[in-house]
Image (cartoon, grey):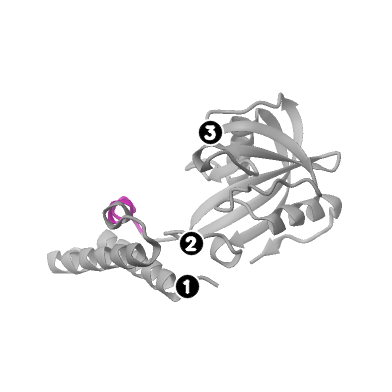
């Protein structure tokens, strides 16, 4: 479970964001801004992050506060799963994926991510899992995130790294590298994708 201070700070940020998006009162705007600043200070105090950077990040959010959506493509061929080295995370390994884009469906987003990060054209076979990031054991994150995992099949393209990746490769179930980008993927999630690929009738995970 995540620490209580992180849950509270995230709740305060969401209250402030939603309030600032809908209030017409100058007094309320001042109060919601103060709540946003408090959330940033709370998160920075306990995490060691920069409070000014966090408050700037919070200020960029607008509209009703909802979880962000991250998509991941599980491309498994001949008992091996596709992983990419994430440049942004010091070359650690992860499944291809990223934030879902506006005006793209979740499946279109994951197809794009696999193409951009690994050079392969894929189709989506199945939505394997919808995970709440906070319940999976990832390191703390400023925002609430839903993670969508798709089983994908290769239909074309050529294995190649992209602008955000430095290497791409396939790994067997017992060959998963230890230097995973745990911000993005965890060992038990990779193992679960192998299980979904093997057991085609397995129901989608919701957690």
Percent x, y of residue 96: 63, 41
| Residue 73 placement (x, y as % from top left) | 67, 44
* Quadrant occupied by the C terminus: bottom right
Label 3 or label 2, whichever comes before in sequence order: 2
Q: Which residues are magenta?
A: 55-63
Task: Give the mark nearer the N terminus: 1 vs 3.
Answer: 1
Say which quarter of the image contains residue 121.
top right
Q: Is residue 155 above or below residue 19?
A: above
Report the Cα–Cα distance between label 2 and label 1: 9 Å
Q: Quadrant of residue 35?
A: bottom left
Please give the name of the residue rendered at 59% of the width and 53% of the height, measured from the top-left corner.
182
Q: Regarding mark 1 in the picture, which secondary structure is present there?
A: loop
Whether residue 101 is situated above or below residue 120 in the rendered picture: below
Q: Position of residue 154 (x, y in %)?
A: 76, 33
Q: Which residue shows up at 19% across the image and 69% down it?
A: 31
Residue 157: give its label: none
Q: Residues within 10 Å of mark 3 (few under 14, many from 20)?
A: some
Residue tagged 3:
164
Q: Nearer the viewer, residue 104 or 69?
A: 69
Circle 1 residue: 3
Residue name at image x 29 percent, y 65 percent: 41
Q: Position of residue 144 (x, y in %)?
A: 47, 61
Q: CB atoms at circles 2 and 1 under 8 Å apart?
A: yes
Q: Residues within 10 Å of mark 2 (few under 14, many from 20)?
A: some
For label 3, the SS is loop
Distance from the alpha carbon under mark 3 to that under mark 2: 22 Å
Q: Which residue is mark 2?
A: 140
């Amino acid at each position: 479970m995540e620490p209580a201070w992180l849950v509270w700070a995230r709740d305060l940020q969401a209250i402030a964001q939603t309030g600032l998006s809908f209030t017409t009162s100058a007094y309320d705007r001042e109060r919601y801004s103060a709540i946003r600043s408090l959330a940033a200070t709370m998160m920075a105090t306990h995490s060691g992050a920069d409070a000014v950077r966090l408050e700037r990040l919070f200020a960029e959010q607008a509209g009703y506060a909802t979880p962000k959506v991250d998509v991941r493509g599980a491309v498994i061929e001949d008992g091996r799963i596709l992983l990419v080295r994430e440049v942004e995370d010091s070359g650690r390994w992860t499944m291809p994926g990223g934030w879902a884009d506006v005006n793209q469906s979740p499946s279109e987003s994951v197809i794009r991510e696999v193409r951009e990060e690994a050079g392969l054209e894929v189709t989506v076979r199945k939505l394997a899992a919808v995970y709440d990031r906070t319940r999976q054991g990832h390191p703390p994150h400023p925002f609430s995130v839903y993670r969508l995992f798709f089983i994908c099949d290769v239909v074309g393209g050529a294995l190649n790294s992209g602008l955000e990746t430095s290497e791409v490769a396939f790994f067997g179930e017992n060959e998963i590298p230890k230097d995973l980008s745990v911000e993005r993927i965890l060992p038990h999630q990779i193992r679960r994708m192998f299980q979904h690929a093997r057991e085609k009738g397995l129901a989608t995970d919701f957690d």
